[in-house]
Amino acid sequence: MKLYYDFHIHSALSPCGDDDMTPNNIVNMSILKGLDAIAVTDHNNAANCEACVELGRRNGIIVVPGMEVQTKEEVHVLCLFKTIEKVKSFEAELYKHFEWIPNSEELLGRQLIFDENDELKGEEKRLLIHSVDLSIYALVELAHSHEGLAIPAHIERKAFSLIANLGFLPPDLKVDALELSKMTAHEKFTAKNPMYRNYRFISNSDAHYLHDISERENWLEVDEKNIESIFKTLGRSSKGGLK
Ligand SMILES: [Zn+2]
Ligand SMILES: [Zn+2]
């Protein structure tokens, strides 16, 4: 069956995310858009995932907890997990490799943390948008060791991307899928770049504002509408050519 998704949404925890990107607003807008599943993926932090997952559970939409990690090479990678426990233990390991630098609110924006009633729980004072001290190889391995998926984000973009920063996708890098920016058609991209044709591509909104959350346009074929089936479809073992 088709599952309509948007697996790259920033909340108000990302300094660049609008302050209206609260858990209730994100979940309700995603339901209005007719999506079956979303992922909340802030920069290098998962503090708003718990409220979003709980609201998803109450309102009948799948919310996958995750984050968008910036590797040492300044490549953005979506890391998605099956449960809050998994994303938290992943974050704890990740933070052993993440230098504490203060956020500059005036320059970059606030980093807001909410509960499931959209009550402000706190603010993250450390700067979230800089690189962790892990290579992309080490990050992919860390995500997999927590049963997570590692999906390089907006790979064809001119900055913070696999192609811009590494030049190409190393064939021995065990990513699960690849994200293309929403304006890039998958077929067009693989026609120009045939070396990527064995990979699964996904397209997300990378929304920082409510109105940018995807319409019911991108879908995955899944056995059932649940997290297990999403991970089965997106996991690298699901695609023939990948080893
Ligand atoms: Zn990004
Ligand atoms: Zn993003």
Image: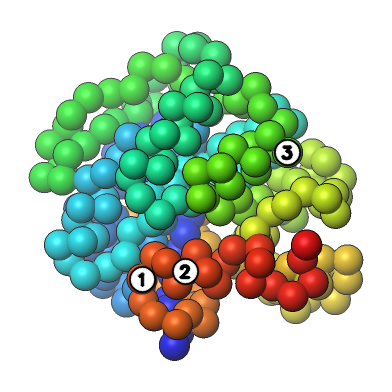
Alpha-carbon distance for marks 2 and 3? 23 Å
Residue 120 pos. (x, y %): 17, 32
2 and 3 marks in contact (CB < 8 Å): no
**Quarter of the rendering occupied by the C terminus:** bottom right
Residue sitting at x 11%, y 45%: 117
Alpha-carbon distance for marks 3 and 1? 28 Å
1 and 2 marks in contact (CB < 8 Å): yes
Q: Is residue 198 above or below residue 63?
A: below
Residue 31 pos. (x, y %): 26, 70
The answer to which of marks 3 and 1 sits earlier in the sequence is 3
Alpha-carbon distance for marks 1 and 2? 6 Å
Amino acid of disc 2: Ile
The residue where tag 2 is placed is 230
Amino acid of disc 1: Asn
Residue 237 pos. (x, y %): 66, 67
Amino acid of disc 3: Tyr
On residue 226, the disc is 1
The residue where tag 3 is placed is 137
| Element assignment for label 3 | helix
Does residue 71 appear left or right of residue 210 in this picture? right
Residue sitting at x 15%, y 62%: 58
